[in-house]
Image: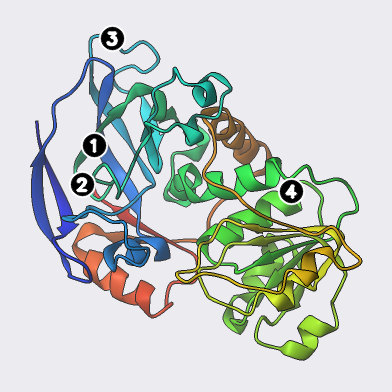
Amino acid sequence: MKIHAWAAKSPKQPLTPFTYEKPLGENDVLIKIKYCTLSKADTFFIDNFWGDMKFPLVPSSDMFGEVMEKGNNVTTINIGDYVGVGYQVYACLKCEYCKQGNEQFCKKQRLIGIHEYGGLAEHIIVNEHFAYKIPPKLQKPEYVSLVCYGLTAYSAITHANLTKNMKIGVIGVGNLGHWAVQILASQGFSVSAFTHTDTKLEQLKQLGVTTFINTLDAKALNANEGMYDFLLVTTYHSYDWSHFIKLLKPEGTLCFVGLPGVNISFPALLLADYARRKITGSYIGSRKDMHDLLNFAQTHDIKAITQVFPVSEVNNVISLRRKNAIPFNAVIQIS
């Protein structure tokens, strides 16, 4: 089938119309896309920030739409279902990780931007097990980024084994970070936001942030040394991470879900001296995590702060993203 999309033909180039062909497999569904996101990470994909992108590149790893056709072996999805698709679009479902319910660790997984074209298109074809039925309450632009960015934050938080009364912080509060803030606040945690952008503060207070600390203010960082149990890094900025490791209590954790473009470094002494601090990372989530998150979002009424644009504005949105002029979530309406 021919699929009409918008793609960057090479790094850092504007998006232009692009057509590719993909057959509908026996285990696949064809989705007519209604909404997709254009995130800050998409600009990094287009610019080949991490050096592993394939071009032409069709961006967007969050999308909602309606199932139009399905393969002969598809049993979990029906024509007419309203579904969401995220960053991962395939796993073997047979390896040890898939059998454990950790499909996101599958060595044969396929990902948007690496192996597959993304959601900035009229249609997409994906394996049925990675098309998630979206409840009617969530079928709005404010929820599109749940299926990648919301999932990434939710999975990291869920698997961190946080307990009541822990002191928690989120470093970077853009699209990914403001999902993290809402998830944590809905779980009853007091959340500190580490940011250098004053224009977001009032909105973040409404989402549940109780404390703000300027990431560029060394005095403010020093004043909070040894106070945090868990810090979630959602930013792509490069900092002197020694400052943030020092914020941790002796058994505290610094967890990366945002990925800076350069190697990080710090004195090993900060992990072990009078402490047992940990630095960890977290990837996207499993299919179970995704279903749990959809239920969580309905129960706690969390949603992204969203600006909606017509598809004709895609290059303008990318320009605004590069200038950090869209603070949280940008959604493209395709159909």
Q: Which disc, if any, is residue 73?
A: 3
- Residue at 54% x, 58% y is 176
Whether label 3 touches label 2, CB < 8 Å = no
Give the residue pinned by disc 1. Answer: 124
Horizontal side, residue 144 vs residue 80: left or right: right
Q: Nearer the viewer, mark 4 or mark 3?
A: 3
Amino acid carrying mark 1 in the image: Ile
Q: Which disc, if any, is residue 186?
A: 4
Q: Disc 4 versus disc 1: distance between alpha carbons?
A: 33 Å
Relative to residue 126, is residue 323 depicted above or below? below
Relative to residue 3, is residue 106 depicted above or below? above
Give the residue pinned by disc 2. Answer: 121
- Residue at 73% x, 45% y is 160
Amino acid carrying mark 2 in the image: Ala
Q: Nearer the viewer, mark 3 or mark 2?
A: 3
Q: Nearer the viewer, residue 263 or 74?
A: 263
Whether label 2 touches label 1, CB < 8 Å = yes
Q: Disc 4 versus disc 3: distance between alpha carbons?
A: 39 Å
Q: Disc 3 versus disc 2: distance between alpha carbons?
A: 25 Å
- What is the crowding at mark 3: few (fewer than 14 residues within 10 Å), some, or many (at least 20)? few
The colour scheme used here is: rainbow
The earlier-in-sequence mark between 4 and 2 is 2
Q: Splitting the image into 4 quarters, where does residue 68 fall?
A: top left
- What is the crowding at mark 1: few (fewer than 14 residues within 10 Å), some, or many (at least 20)? many
Amino acid carrying mark 4 in the image: Ser
Q: Is residue 78 visible?
A: yes
Q: Nearer the viewer, residue 182 or 112?
A: 112
The earlier-in-sequence mark between 4 and 1 is 1
Horizontal side, residue 302 vs residue 35: left or right: right
The earlier-in-sequence mark between 3 and 2 is 3
The earlier-in-sequence mark between 3 and 1 is 3
- Residue at 43% x, 46% y is 144
